[in-house]
Amino acid sequence: MTAPYIIAEAAQGFEGNPALASLLVRGASAAGADAIKFQIVVADEIAVPDHSYYDLYCRHEMPLEAWAKIRADAKAAGIDLVTDVYGPKGLEIARAINVDGIKLHSLTFFEDVLTRSVLDTEKPVYVSIGGVTNEEIDTYVRQFQLVERGNVTILFGYQAEPTPIDRNNLARMAALRSLTGLEIGFQDHTEGTGPDTVTLSAVALGLGVRLFEKHIT
């Protein structure tokens, strides 16, 4: 049986601060995670200038040198570095620092050019399908020949944090595996201090899930 692979989801928890990002890498390693994941933020790839969060996204941007330091920190800590990318500039950074995997957020699910560019890196790719219909997923898998690639995992999880227990619908895991022919990972957005912080992922493990994304912040 394949051992679980746990991604500590730091997302934008680094707040544009390289020192904070380094602390999160150390925390993920100390917690026993296999990888840490950050979102590479380029404001113009996520929002238009008059969006209410645009200035916040700008404050989360970091130069290549900062990302290279985070990459080095992850190597030193003995864990993988996975990043979300939302456009070509973010992908350029991910490629430059040679990340261990790339996630495509459900926000970019219909961005065909970005999807193909990410797949062309030949890195492990994690595709979030929160809010996407089965028909759209089936079309996507066929369009990009994901089964033949062998390095793509579909990530299932309700896109709200914390997720109410009754919204997780773990029974969908088997259906998604049958629909796609791919490995299905679980984005566990359970309340970190609640009673089900471990239980839900344990149930998913029993359903055959081997890749887990759990928030570290």
Image: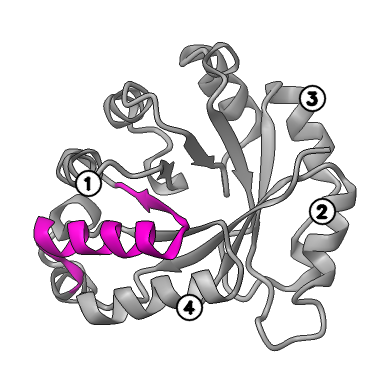
Query: As rendered, which of 47 and 12 lies closer to the eye?
Result: 12
Q: Which residue is mark 2?
A: 204
Q: Measure the alpha-carbon separation of dots 4 and 1.
A: 21 Å
Q: Which dot marks residue 97?
A: 1
Write down the region rendered in magenta.
Answer: 60-85
- The residue that disc 3 covers is 178
Compared across the picture, whether 37 is left or right of 57 comes to right
The mark that comes first in sequence, 2 or 3, is: 3
Residue nearest the observer in this picture, 66 or 171: 66
Tell me residue 32's x, y (percent). Answer: 61, 68
Local secondary structure at mark 1: loop
N-term-proximal mark, 1 vs 3 = 1
Residue highlighted by disc 4:
27
Question: Which of label 2 and label 3 is nearer to you?
Answer: 2
Q: CA distance from mark 3 to mark 4?
A: 36 Å
Mark with earlier residue (3, 4): 4
Whichever of labels 4 and 1 marks the residue nearer the N terminus, that label is 4
Q: Residue at x 72, y 50 (%)?
A: 4
Q: Secondary structure at mark 2?
A: helix
Label 4: how many Cα within 10 Å (few below 14, some 14–19, many 20+): some
Image coordinates for residue 35, horizontal then vertical, percent: 50, 57
